[in-house]
């Protein structure tokens, strides 16, 4: 297992949940929620987090349909990941299948005793934790980084 802090992002239309792991890549914890901004402030905040935490890798959840197909959300996550990769190069950005991450996050929040009303503020962070835990588990079992590399792009270009 490669050492180093990794950040995970659960990209939604309104919010982006953020999680991080420790330098030994053992424990994933919620970090914050960014608010999407059509001017890219969320991307700048994400890039600042990568720099501030000296992250060695970024994981972005790739929402797919249950059949594995793409949607507008899939395209949006790919675009967001590419733009972030362009901002933080040479730090790699990887796209990891996130099917059921939000469902798992909701279930875990229910099981922890949280009420549905209080979910909105933390569900995106919890989903980012699920995505990061999945990526770390994949790397532990395969000895290779999870997912696919995101190609760096400039904002507004693909």
Image: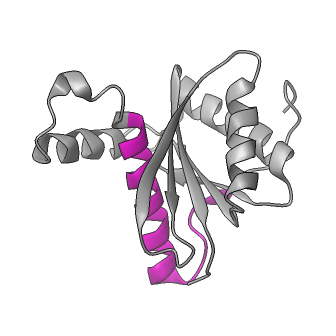
Query: Which quadrant of the structure image shows residue 35?
Result: top right
| Residue 46 screen position, x and y as percent | 68, 41
Identify the image quadrant of residue 105: top left
- Whether 129 is drawn above or below 126: the answer is below
Q: At 53% from the left edge and 21% from the top edge, which residue is drawn?
A: 13
Which residue corresponds to the image point at 73% horizontal and 25% vertical from the top-left?
41
Q: Nearer the viewer, residue 92 or 126?
A: 126
Instruction: Answer above or below: position of 47 versus 20.
Output: above
Residue 144 drawn in magenta: yes
Asked if residue 43 is positioned above or below residue 101 in the image, the reply reads above
| Applied colour scheme | one colour
Q: Is residue 67 left or right of residue 106?
A: right
Residue 17 is at least partly visible in this image: no
Magenta part of the chain: 124-149
How far from the left and from the top, in percent, is residue 43?
72, 33
| Residue 107 pos. (x, y %) | 18, 43
Q: Nearer the viewer, residue 156 or 24?
A: 24
Q: Main secondary structure of the magenta part?
A: helix
Furthest residue in direction top, as rendered: 38
Q: Is residue 40 magenta?
A: no
x then y, percent, for residue 42: 67, 29
Tell me the quarter of the image containing the N terminus: bottom right
């Amino acid at each position: 297992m490669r050492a180093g802090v990794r950040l995970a992002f659960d990209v939604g239309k309104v919010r982006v949940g953020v999680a991080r792991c420790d330098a030994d890549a053992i424990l994933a914890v919620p970090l914050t929620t960014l608010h999407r901004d059509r001017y890219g402030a969320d991307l700048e905040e994400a890039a600042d987090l990568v720099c501030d935490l000296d992250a060695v890798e970024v994981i972005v959840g790739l929402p797919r349909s249950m059949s594995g197909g793409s949607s507008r959300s899939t395209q949006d996550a790919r675009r967001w990941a590419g733009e972030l990769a362009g901002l933080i190069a040479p730090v790699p950005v990887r796209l990891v299948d996130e099917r059921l991450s939000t469902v798992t996050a909701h279930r875990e929040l229910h099981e922890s005793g949280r009420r549905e009303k209080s979910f909105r503020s933390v569900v995106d962070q919890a989903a980012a934790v699920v995505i990061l835990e999945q990526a770390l588990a994949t790397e532990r079992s395969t000895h290779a980084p999870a997912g696919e590399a995101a190609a760096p792009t400039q904002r507004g270009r693909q």
